[in-house]
Image (cartoon, rainbow, N blue to C red):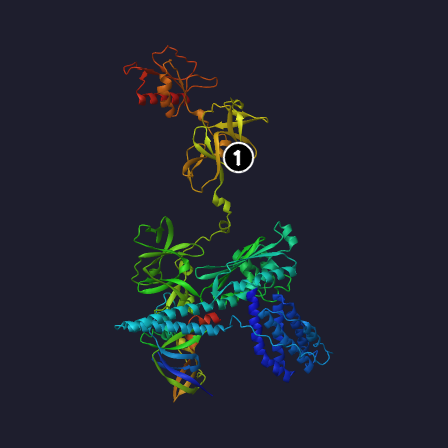
């Protein structure tokens, strides 16, 4: 059984995001900083009449900040809208969700955020769980 | 009550409309459980509302139908066609009655008994039922029920429209504008602005929607428990978001039931505890800063902490060791533990398994807090603090460095410019203290708190929190705006600095600062205002009452009224100097009196009879004036024996007599002013020339010694008859008529030397 996945580039790597989790993909304009917020939170941005919290996905994955990223995917996690910065967007594909190969040593936060993998024309891509990139939300749910 | 009735009518109509399809289907398949449940729910709801709204006829119908349907649900009766028809007839009738209530016209009730009778198991086949459905004109409803979701979408659409208008205006202004385009744009702006206000208001609801049902609920609950409870509702006009009103309903109802059931004692217990028989329940709503505070306060028995602790130990929720280490506040918090009700007996009112834990969870889910103030034996106050997010609040937009933030206007007392003379900043240790018109406030520099570089503080916003005030250093005030504030995401909320986020017309997101959170982040600790201070009696603030009078020496003075027994006139002859002081003879005995000056030469003297409850004292006065309320502001009169304070009454300085000193016998009567004996030589010079000078310098003068008088100093002319009487026992100052005189006399016009000599002589005698 195949699912729809949006293929995006984060920190120079292509990853798959379940299309059902994504509301839209947008260009992010001006970002208003939020003093004292965790470093994962880049700030707030206006998305039409809505305010979204911009997540620096690279920082969330334990990598250096993705300063170049100007695009983002919008996801709703626990009633709040987040814009997750991505380097580039590819397209949506119908792919089959595969379990992570056992013994695959994922480093750092990748392991915490990946929920499986897909095979795009022979190229394996990690499936990222967007809600796990969002700080605070998990802690509240626990 | 009218609102509730309207709501009931709207709801019944709506359900009936939705139900009509179900009813037809049920008729076709009477065994369909889902349809049956839907109809059961409807009649059950109607029954419940009828009891509440006092609609007995509707209630009777619904009750009968509910009984039958419940029998069908339990399988005690089959759902045959006769039963279905009978139930449907009742549902129809409920619809008719509802319309009759809405239209305000009467509907005869002849068929209702028949309808109910038709529900009976052995009822004859319904023949009469088809009668009497005379078509009644449906009254146009004045309100429409809308899904909140629809309102939300409307709100979002509205905001989009405002942003689009702003963008359009910006773009158009880049070019020279045709006056007609300008006019059209102006009109568009105005309309959009008005629209937004209207749409915004659709989300707001007065909290009275929540409160209006309370009096009845409290009454019913109290009655069923045999208690008397007086309900006070305050602040019903506070507006808050519709959604919040709904979310607050259940917690509020639960807390109030708890208060009536567990908190307020039975009349007998209350009488035994010396309280008023009727318990008091105060439900209040107020907006403080960025919060709505709902307070539910009862004067019942409060929470028995020790029992809570015992129960926690018994149920194994906490170990004894943990319990022993808890503070009082933490012990109180145990009430929020699941399954720990302080009441041992579960009652039908509040013991339905819904505890304070659920209340707290519900309030915290909407970002609120539950605070308890327990007064064991005297009552409990529960405060639900609900954030204003979801709602529209007036804000002040401030700039710090290059950043902008919003502050809730309610929490700002004032904004003062730093360059003004009214403000000064001082370093107190490592912290900055702002003094604003004499008021000293801790200062928080917003720029450095938020790590914003290039902040130049030019103004102070005086922020009032629940606990105290502080001055917030900001760069400048940009604007004031009413904003729709939405909650921030959890990770941002966790910083504790922000109360919400919003999107103003500019299109740039804006964070709403939380005044209390900033104080906490800056490490300000206010001593919480004590209960006593808020409940201080008003009388104290008004000042004590006092008797204003003219004293014997001509001064206007005041005596605390509480010490005054009465004012009366006594014969001059009743006052005698006995035992070294003045006494007043009364029929009942003798009391000491005090005179602050010479006794008047009249036959009658006014005396204020003072009492401290045990002993009495008299204060001779010239004339009683009036009873005044003493101002709170008083200048202390340190070092002036007999004067407690100097007060300003009606623009005049008045000395308040120190009654304590009076009763303590510490007051030296003016008799203690040194007495000068003037040896007059018959020329009258001494009396006319010398006497005023001496009296002005604080001496009493006499030319004729009375029996009990002792002169401190005697003045005599050096050339007078050598009557150097040592009998007076006082030093004598001799005066000469000529400047060239003997060494032992002073020239009588050498004023300074004369005064000095008298003072030296009097002093030597007294020492």
Q: Quadrant of residue B356?
A: bottom right
Location of residue B695 with respect to B118 vertically, above or below: above
Q: Quadrant of residue B215?
A: bottom right
Q: Residues within 10 Å of mark 1 (few under 14, many from 20)?
A: many
Q: Is residue B417 left or right of residue B765?
A: left
Residue B487 visible in image: no
Residue B512 visible in image: yes
Q: Quadrant of residue B757?
A: top left
**Residue placed most toward the observer, A116 or B54:** B54
Chain containing mark 1? B
Q: Position of residue B473 (x, y in %)?
A: 34, 57
Location of residue A52 with respect to B437 vertically, above or below: below
Q: Position of residue B94 (x, y in %)?
A: 62, 74
The residue that label 1 is drawn on is B564
Location of residue B49 with respect to B371 vertically, above or below: below
Q: Position of residue B299 (x, y in %)?
A: 58, 54
Q: Is residue A2 left or right of residue B415?
A: right
Residue at far bottom of view: A121
């Amino acid at each position: 059984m195949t699912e729809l996945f949006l293929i995006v580039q984060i920190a120079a790597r292509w990853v798959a995001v379940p299309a059902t989790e994504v509301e839209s993909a947008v260009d992010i304009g001006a970002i208003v900083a939020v003093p004292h917020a965790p470093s994962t939170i880049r700030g707030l941005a206006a998305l039409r009449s809505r305010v979204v919290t911009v997540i620096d996905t690279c920082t969330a994955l334990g990598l250096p900040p993705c300063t170049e990223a100007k695009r983002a995917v919008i996801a709703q996690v626990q009633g709040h809208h987040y814009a997750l910065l991505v380097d580039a967007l590819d397209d949506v594909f119908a792919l089959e969700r595969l379990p992570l190969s056992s013994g695959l040593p994922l480093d750092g936060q990748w392991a915490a955020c990946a929920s499986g993998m897909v095979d795009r024309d022979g190229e394996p891509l990690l499936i990222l769980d967007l809600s796990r990139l969002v700080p605070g939300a998990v802690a509240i749910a626990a | 009550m009218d609102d509730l009735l309207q709501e009931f009518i709207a709801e019944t109509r709506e359900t009936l409309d939705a139900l009509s399809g179900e009813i037809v289907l049920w008729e076709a398949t009477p065994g369909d459980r889902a349809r049956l449940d839907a109809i059961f729910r409807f009649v059950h709801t109607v029954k419940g509302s009828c009891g509440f709204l006092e609609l007995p006829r509707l209630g009777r119908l619904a009750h009968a139908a509910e009984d039958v349907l419940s029998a069908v649900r339990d399988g005690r009766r089959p759902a045959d066609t006769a039963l279905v028809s009978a139930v449907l007839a009742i549902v129809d009738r409920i619809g008719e009655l509802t319309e009759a209530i809405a239209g305000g016209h009467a509907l005869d009730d002849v068929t209702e008994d028949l309808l109910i009778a038709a529900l009976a198991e052995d009822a004859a086949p319904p023949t009469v039922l088809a009668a009497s459905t005379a078509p009644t004109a449906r009254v146009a409803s004045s309100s429409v029920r809308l899904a909140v979701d629809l309102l939300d979408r409307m709100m979002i659409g509205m905001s989009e429209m405002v942003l689009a208008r702003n963008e359009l205006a910006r773009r158009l202004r880049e070019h020279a504008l045709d006056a007609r385009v300008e006019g059209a744009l102006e009109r568009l702006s105005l309309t959009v602005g008005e629209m937004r206000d209207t749409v915004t208001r659709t989300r707001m609801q007065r909290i009275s929607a929540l409160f209006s049902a309370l009096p009845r609920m409290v009454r019913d609950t109290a009655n069923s428990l045999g208690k008397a409870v007086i309900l006070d509702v305050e602040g019903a006009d506070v507006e808050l978001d519709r959604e919040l009103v709904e979310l607050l309903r259940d917690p509020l109802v639960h807390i109030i039931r708890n208060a009536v059931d567990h908190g307020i004692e039975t009349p007998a217990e209350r009488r035994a505890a010396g309280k008023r028989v009727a318990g008091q329940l105060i439900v209040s709503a107020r907006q403080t800063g960025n919060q709505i505070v709902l307070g539910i306060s009862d004067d019942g028995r409060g929470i028995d902490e020790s029992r809570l602790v015992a129960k926690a130990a018994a149920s194994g929720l906490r170990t004894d060791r943990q319990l022993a280490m808890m503070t009082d506040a933490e012990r109180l918090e145990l009430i929020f533990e699941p399954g720990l009700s302080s009441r041992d007996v579960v009652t039908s009112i509040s013991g339905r398994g819904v505890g304070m834990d659920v209340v707290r969870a519900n309030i915290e889910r909407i970002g609120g807090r539950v605070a308890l103030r327990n007064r064991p034996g005297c009552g409990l106050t529960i405060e639900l603090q609900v954030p204003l997010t979801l709602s529209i609040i007036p804000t002040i937009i401030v700039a710090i460095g290059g950043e902008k933030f919003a502050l809730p206007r309610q929490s700002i007392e004032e904004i003062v410019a730093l360059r003004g003379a009214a403000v000064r900043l001082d370093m107190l240790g490592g912290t900055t203290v702002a003094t604003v018109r004499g008021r000293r406030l801790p200062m928080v520099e917003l720029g450095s708190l938020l790590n914003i570089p290039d902040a130049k503080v030019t103004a102070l916003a005086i922020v009032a929190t629940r606990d105290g005030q502080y001055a917030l250093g900001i760069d400048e005030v940009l604007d004031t705006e009413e904003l729709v504030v939405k909650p921030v995401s959890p990770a941002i909320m966790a910083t504790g600095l922000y109360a919400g986020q919003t999107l103003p017309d500019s299109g740039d997101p804006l964070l709403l600062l939380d005044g209390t959170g900033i104080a906490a982040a800056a490490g300000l600790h206010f001593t919480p205002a004590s209960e006593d201070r808020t409940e201080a009696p008003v009388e104290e603030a008004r000042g004590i009452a006092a008797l204003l009078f003219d004293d014997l020496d001509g001064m206007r003075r005041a005596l605390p009224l509480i010490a005054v027994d009465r004012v009366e006139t006594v014969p001059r002859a009743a006052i005698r100097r006995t035992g070294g002081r003045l006494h007043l003879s009364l029929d009942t005995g003798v009391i000491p009196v005090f005179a602050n000056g010479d006794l008047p030469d009249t036959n009658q003297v006014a005396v204020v009879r003072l009492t401290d409850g045990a002993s009495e004292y008299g204060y001779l006065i010239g004339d009683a004036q009036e009873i005044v309320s003493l101002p709170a502001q008083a200048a202390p009169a340190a070092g002036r024996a007999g004067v407690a304070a100097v007060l300003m009454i009606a623009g005049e300085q008045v000395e308040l007599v120190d009654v304590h000193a009076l009763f303590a016998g510490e007051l030296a009567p003016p008799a203690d002013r040194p007495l000068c004996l003037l040896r007059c030589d018959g020329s009258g010079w001494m009396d006319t020339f010398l006497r005023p000078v001496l009296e002005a310098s604080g001496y009493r003068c006499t030319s004729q010694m009375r029996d009990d008088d002792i002169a401190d100093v005697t003045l005599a002319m050096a050339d007078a008859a050598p009557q150097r009487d040592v009998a007076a026992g006082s030093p004598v100052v001799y005066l000469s008529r000529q400047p060239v005189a003997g060494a032992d006399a002073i020239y009588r016009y050498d004023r300074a030397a004369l005064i000095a000599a008298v003072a030296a002589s009097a002093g030597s005698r007294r020492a």
